[in-house]
Image: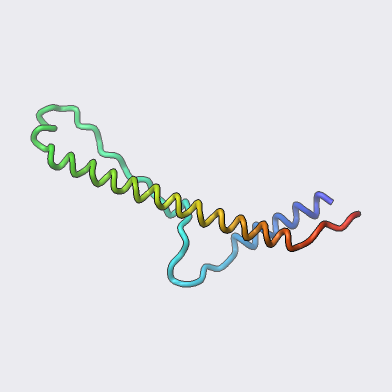
Amino acid sequence: MPHLASRRTCLLVAAMLTKPVGGVAQAATALDCLPPIPPAPVTDAATRAEYSTEIRQEFTTYFDEAQAYLRCLDAARGEVSEEINRAIRDYQSLGPEPDG
């Protein structure tokens, strides 16, 4: 019965979305990961020469924040993968669908 399977899937998804979060620390989600804003290009040679230290620092900060962003996405991906695997195990534990 395809309708029953889709109902089970909807219930499973609803249960996952309404699952309370326990503890103080929460797992990362992709929504927790904010991409850094890249530094604005400085094309004026005089400005580049006068503010080269500050410009370099902006780029260094950007690269550090970009690495943190990518680590956050990796953590969110890992958490979602674990949730999917748990959902698969829960779904499989329901057993085969009855005929009819």
Image quarter where the C terminus lies is bottom right
Query: Residue shown at 73%/63% (left/top)?
Result: 93
Query: Residue shown at 65%/57% (left/top)?
Result: 13
46 to the left or right of 67 = left
**x and y, in percent, of residue 3 in the image:** 80, 51
Which of the two residues, 100 or 47, is positioned nearer the viewer here? Answer: 100
* Position above or below: 43 against 95: above
Judged from this view, the residue extending furthest toward the right is 100
Query: Residue shown at 50%/51% (left/top)?
Result: 77
Q: In the rendered view, how is the structure colored?
A: rainbow
69 to the left or right of 12 = left
Residue 83 sits in quarter: bottom right
Query: Residue shown at 56%/58% (left/top)?
Result: 82
**x and y, in percent, of residue 52 in the image:** 13, 37
**x and y, in percent, of residue 73 in the image:** 44, 50
**x and y, in percent, of residue 44 in the image:** 15, 27
Q: Count every numbered label the image shows and give the total.
A: 0
* Position above or below: 20 against 60: below
17 to the left or right of 93 = left
